[in-house]
Image (tube, rainbow, N blue to C red):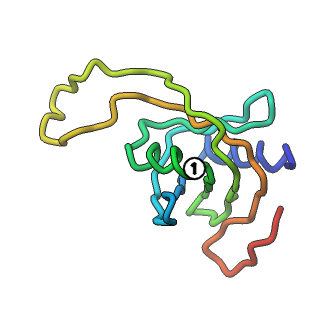
C-alpha cells in the first residue's frame, strides 16, 4: 500500500475533507457513519476515531471489511481506502450524563479508534471516474 496516498488522505481529512466509514453486516447490509479523525500510524496502519454508533461496531464484530472515504466536496477530490479493521481501541469514556442531551435517547458513551490495515486506495470523486487504484 502506497504510504504517499495514505498521507494525502490523512492531510485531506485535516482540511476540508469529510470522513465516512462504511461497514456491512455478515449478510451484506451496509452501514455508513461519519468519523471525526484520521491518522497514519507509525506501522502504516490507519487509525480512525469517532464516537461510533453500535451499528458500526456490531458490523465489525462479524465482518472486518471496511471502506474509509475522505472527500472534499468543494474541490470534489478524495480517496477511498479499502481494508480490514484489525482492532478497536477505547480512547475516552463518558460518565453517562450529558446535560441538555436527555431527549436524544442513547448516545455513544465511548470514543474509539478503529485500526485499519489498508489494502487498496481508489480515487473518490462525484465526477465520472473509474474505480482505478491510485
Which residue occupies the extreme top position in the image? 95
Of the 4 image quadrants, the one containing the C terminus is bottom right
Left or right: 63 as drawn, with respect to 131: left
Which one is in front, 115 or 98?
115
Q: How many marks?
A: 1
Q: Residues within 10 Å of mark 1 (few under 14, many from 20)?
A: some
Q: x and y percent of residue 125 in the render?
A: 65, 69
Task: Classify residue 40 by image quadrant.
Answer: top right
Q: x and y percent of residue 38 in the render?
A: 62, 39
Which residue occupies the extreme left position in the image? 103
Q: Can residue 4 be seen in this view?
A: yes
Q: Can residue 68 be seen in this view?
A: no
The residue wearing badge 1 is 16
Name the secondary structure under disc 1. loop
Left or right: 91 as drawn, with respect to 2: left
Tell me the residue at 50%/25% (across/down). Answer: 90
Which one is in front, 24 or 68?
24
Task: Classify residue 53 by image quadrant.
Answer: top left
Q: x and y percent of residue 84 in the render?
A: 68, 48
Which one is in front, 28 or 50?
28
Q: x and y percent of residue 91 in the render?
A: 50, 22
Tell me the residue at 51%/44% (across/down). Answer: 61
Q: Is residue 126 above or below residue 104?
A: below
Tell me the residue at 61%/49% (across/down). Answer: 64
Q: Is residue 29 above or below residue 7?
A: below
Left or right: 133 as drawn, with respect to 80: right
Q: In this view, does 134 lie above or below 129?
A: above
Amino acid at each position: 500500500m502506497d504510504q504517499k496516498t495514505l498521507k494525502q488522505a490523512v492531510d485531506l481529512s485535516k482540511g476540508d475533507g469529510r470522513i465516512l466509514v462504511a461497514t456491512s453486516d455478515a449478510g451484506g447490509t451496509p452501514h455508513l457513519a461519519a468519523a471525526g479523525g484520521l491518522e497514519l500510524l507509525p506501522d502504516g496502519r490507519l487509525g480512525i476515531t469517532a464516537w461510533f454508533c453500535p451499528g458500526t461496531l456490531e458490523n465489525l464484530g462479524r465482518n472486518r471489511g471496511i471502506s474509509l472515504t475522505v472527500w472534499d466536496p468543494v474541490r470534489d477530490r478524495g480517496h477511498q481506502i479499502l481494508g480490514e479493521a484489525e482492532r478497536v481501541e477505547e480512547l475516552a469514556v463518558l460518565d453517562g450524563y450529558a446535560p441538555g442531551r436527555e431527549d436524544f435517547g442513547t448516545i455513544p458513551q465511548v470514543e474509539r479508534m478503529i485500526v485499519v490495515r489498508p489494502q487498496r486506495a481508489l480515487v473518490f470523486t462525484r465526477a465520472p471516474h473509474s474505480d482505478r487504484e491510485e
